[in-house]
Image (cartoon, rainbow, N blue to C red):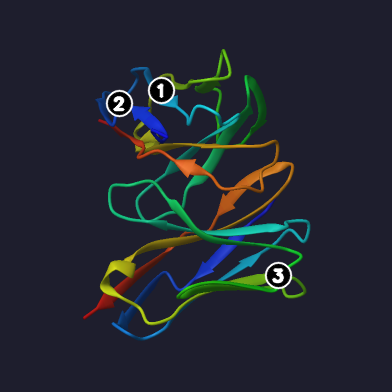
Amino acid sequence: DTGVSQDPRHKITKRGQNVTFRCDPISEHNRLYWYRQTLGQGPEFLTYFQNEAQLEKSRLLSDRFSAERPKGSFSTLEIQRTEQGDSAMYLCASSRGASNTGELFFGEGSRLTVL
Amino acid sequence: GENVEQHPSTLSVQEGDSAVIKCTYSDSASNYFPWYKQELGKGPQLIIDIRSNVGEKKDQRIAVTLNKTAKHFSLHITETQPEDSAVYFCAASMAGTALIFGKGTTLSVSS
């Protein structure tokens, strides 16, 4: 069990640039979640996948955000035309099963700084 | 949608004392209530959870209680130790919706 891995761990970009984050879940986990966390706040739900199907998207996920999980394994989160308000830690988590009522295993996050 | 409120935002205790963190939720359909601990530079990690068919659950020094009628649940840590210092998050969900987190409580245990 190698845990959830995220890449890159840190990303500094200029406003207006596009960024992409990658998440590799625990191999036998079929659910994958993206959360955003700003300083002093709890994780805010963005979206989640059951295998390759994107089942729920938060209102926080504006049109500039897109997430994919093309083969039901790793996932990418892309932010287009970044804004300073996008600066945050982007957390990925995975879980077993077909329900949202089970343990989430989080990665260590990808920290985005938009200058 | 679900909304989870958490109090207090910061909590300082002496080693050996008990710590209590309280949360309320808004959606009576929520039936799963986990607590996560986040240490600096790491992702949150599950420490205990409770489902709506249970009123209390214990795991060594940690316990969680749930009052479905009042829509609130609490985390109790007894005999606190310096390594309990971290940020604690409560959360709520149901089968068809993702986990919604509270804003967190920073617990500091001084020796």
Residue beneath the point at 50% across and 27% down: A27
Q: In the rendered view, tell whether residue B45 sits above or below residue B4.
A: above
Dots 3 and 1 on the same chain = no
Dots 2 and 3 on the same chain = no
Question: Can you give x and y, in whole percent of width and height, for residue B83 in the image?
Answer: 28, 67
Q: In the rendered view, tell whether residue B79 sits above or below residue A74.
A: below
Quarter location, residue B12: bottom left
Left or right of B26 on screen, residue A80: left
Left or right of A98 on screen, residue B61: left
Left or right of B39 on screen, residue A72: right
Q: Nearer the viewer, residue A48 or A113?
A: A48
Q: Which residue is mark 3?
A: B71
Measured Cα–Cα span from mark 2 to mark 1: 7 Å
What element does badge 2 sit on?
loop
Say which amino acid is labelled 2.
Pro
Residue beneath the point at 40% across and 38% down: A107
Quarter location, residue A96: top right
Q: Which mark is residue A8?
A: 2
Say which amino acid is labelled 3.
Lys
Q: Pinpoint the chain carrying mark 3.
A: B
Q: Pinpoint the chain carrying mark 1.
A: A
